[in-house]
Amino acid sequence: DQRDPLAHIARLVVGQDPLLREVVEMERSTLSARSRRIFTLSAIYGATKALLEGSELGLDEAGAIAAEFWRELARQFPEWEAVRAQKMRAGEIRQDFLHSHAVVLQALGRTGNALLFQNNRRGWKRKLRKLRSIDWSRSNSQLWEGRCMSGGRVSKAGQYVKLTTNLLKAHLDLPLTDEEQRLEKVYLEGRRAS
């Protein structure tokens, strides 16, 4: 939508970043198995919306902050660069790693929102580097089942975005909100019961 300021920001972020320009599908809302792209623009839009939610910034400032966040975020995932450099196929990344899925991108946006707008911004890039130590492989069901996967399949349901955000925030030593703490408690109780 040309009238949506967030859509403008998402297009701007992708257009300004050499890596994202190569790995984001700008035309279609879905990716075929053979696509050379990792993400759709709609996934970047949803994650950017989560990143900027409640920030009340002007268009230029929001665009600059979103672009800086995405540049720094991309540095944490060498697989994204490997696709751009044609050293890995995008389909392999989407099949093997969860950081290429919309549910995780949205959780990363929500986590970025906490880093940039809910906490002291100092050191946010350093904190973001901790994402490198997460095992993002889809086969790591111990970590991801019930967070962003259900029965071995990736799920975009809102609860999964929130549970994945909880995991990311905890990994980056960010406090959970009261609502996030309640959801985490229910999740952990369910895991203990099963």
Image (tube, helix red, strand yellow):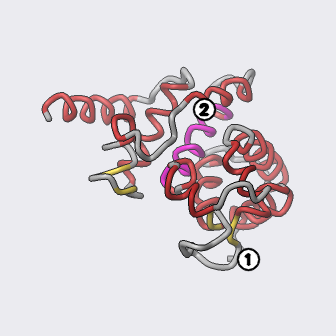
Name the residue tied to disc 2: 131
Name the residue tied to disc 1: 2
Q: Which residue occupies the foreground of this view, 93 or 173?
A: 93
Between marks 1 and 2 in the image, the one whose residue lies nearer the viewer: 2
* Prevalent SS, magenta region: helix
At a point 83% along the width and 63% down the height, the residue shown is: 15
What amino acid type is highlighted by mark number 1? Gln
At a point 44% along the width and 30% down the height, the residue shown is: 177
Q: Residue furthest left?
A: 193
Q: Which residue occupies the foreground of this view, 176 or 70?
A: 70
Looking at the rendered structure, the secondary structure element under dot 2 is: helix
Q: CA distance from mark 1 to mark 2?
A: 33 Å
Looking at the rendered structure, the secondary structure element under dot 1 is: loop
At a point 57% along the width and 25% down the height, the residue shown is: 172
Magenta span of residues? 103-116
Q: Within the image, what quadrant is residue 179 found in?
A: top left
Q: Earlier in the sequence, mark 1 or mark 2?
A: 1
Q: Is residue 114 left or right of residue 168?
A: right
Residue 108 lies, in percent from the top left, at 57, 43
Residue 166 lies, in percent from the top left, at 44, 34
Residue 155 lies, in percent from the top left, at 38, 57
Q: Residue furthest front?
A: 87
Quarter of the image containing the N terminus? bottom right
Mark 2 packing: few (<14 Cα in 10 Å), some, or many (20+)?
some
Mark 1 packing: few (<14 Cα in 10 Å), some, or many (20+)?
few
At a point 39% along the width and 34% down the height, the residue shown is: 180
Q: Is residue 60 above or below residue 182?
A: below
Q: Within the image, what quadrant is residue 90 found in?
A: bottom right
Residue 71 part of the magenta-drawn span? no
Residue 141 lies, in percent from the top left, at 35, 41
